[in-house]
Image (cartoon, rainbow, N blue to C red):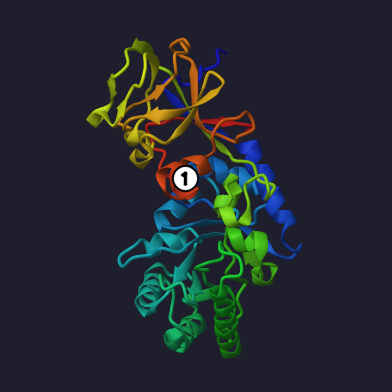
Amino acid sequence: MTETPPPRRARAEIDLGALRANVRTLRARVAPHVRIMAVVKADAYGHGAVRCARAALDAGADWLGTATPHEALALRAAGITDVPVMCWLWTPGDPWDQGIEAGLDMSVSGMWALEEVLEAARRTGGTARIQLKADTGLGRNGCQPADWPELVEAALKGEADGLVKVTGLWSHFACADEPHHPSIAVQLDVFRSMLDHAEQAGVEPEVRHIANSPATLTLPEAHFDLVRPGIAMYGISPSPELGTSADLGLKPVMSLKGSIALVKRVPAGHGVSYGHHYVTERETTLGLVPLGYADGVPRHASGRGPVLVDGAVRTVAGRVAMDQFVVDLGGDEPEAGTEAVLFGSGDRGEPTAEDWAVAADTIAYEIVTRIGARVPRVYLGE
């Protein structure tokens, strides 16, 4: 059988061996009784949800987590049916019926959601698995402490009626990526108080959880029954203040690569790309990289984004366009087809997603999740 050659224009290489190693590293950070929810929302942060979910489970993850119900249902449709899958971002009219039938753990943050899931349980004749989310200070989704007693009481009534089973109590940190931020201790105190109220009222959760990637790595007191690593599973540090990926024992999973489409010599004073924000200072060579903001390369990194070409790190010359950008090769003349590495693990001197985050004044989460569907994923280490 003839092997399919790798895509030449552009590709995102996904190292599933590195992902499995990262899950094992995270497993070593928590106590034996603490379960791991591998967060695969947003197509596994751009890495490919189904393949990454399977790799994470192979490495010892116990649960899967998604944001939307449609993401969770897609995992079930792909045949991942024997592990708990939780989804937390519901809106009115979402597919509660399908969630019940698929055995999803569905987050409930307020009375409207509880009422919709109770009605869905009546329609389907099933028992919905729900997790009550507490707003302990993040101020996004979740039930405020003042409204918590009403939600808990109503959920327990639904449980007594056989319509729901409260499987979890949970929350989310605002500043766990900022070591020693005062809000961390405050949120933990609020969470413990809300847990105590729910459990004294009669809730018997399977899991209690609040720890995201940075809390998994640095706050053992926040691990409770389950931790929810997301970005760390993909080998990216949650925050420069916590250290680099290497400092944390993690290896980046995604490498973004393209092939130089054209190399040409231009004179001094030659404008490059839209607006001529870059003008050559001397005679030089330019290399065309066939990736642009339609592929997820941030336009904000124009003039700053680093790229490894022919053994040297170059910089984006001028604006990133929709489908392409240019690097100044400084007179070097690599052949067309030479590999250009935008980011990777850094092991071979290539830039990392964190380097691109600095160049675009954003976070590495955004760099990897924004890589679009036009860039084929090539999986290594399956």
Residue 273 shows up from this direction? yes
Where disc 1 sits, the SS reads: helix
Report the quarter where the C terminus lies: top right
The quarter of the picture where the N terminus appears is top right
Which residue lies at the image location 46% right of the left edge and 85% below the top edge?
145
Horizontal and vertical percent position of residue 319: 31, 32
Q: Which residue appears farthest toward the left when viewing the image?
A: 275
User: In the depicted view, which residue is nearer to us: 314 or 214?
Assistant: 314
In which quadrant of the rendered view does residue 143 lie?
A: bottom left
* Visible residue check, residue 63: no
**Does residue 273 lie above or below 336 as drawn?**
below
User: x and y percent of residue 25 in the render?
Assistant: 71, 50
Task: Give whichever of 161, 220 is nearer the camera.
Answer: 220
Kind of residue at badge 1: Val
Which residue is pictured at 51% across the width and 17% down the height? 4
**Which residue sits at x=60%, y=36%?**
345
Please tell me which residue lies in front, 345 or 149. Answer: 345
Tally of numbered tags:
1
Vertical arrangement, residue 336 with respect to residue 80, above or below = above
How busy is the neighbourhood of tag 1: few (under 14 within 10 Å), some, or many (20 plus)?
some
Q: Position of residue 163 (x, y in %)?
A: 46, 76
Please name whichever residue, 131 or 321, is drawn nearer the observer in this view of the structure: 321
**Mark 1 highlights which residue?**
358
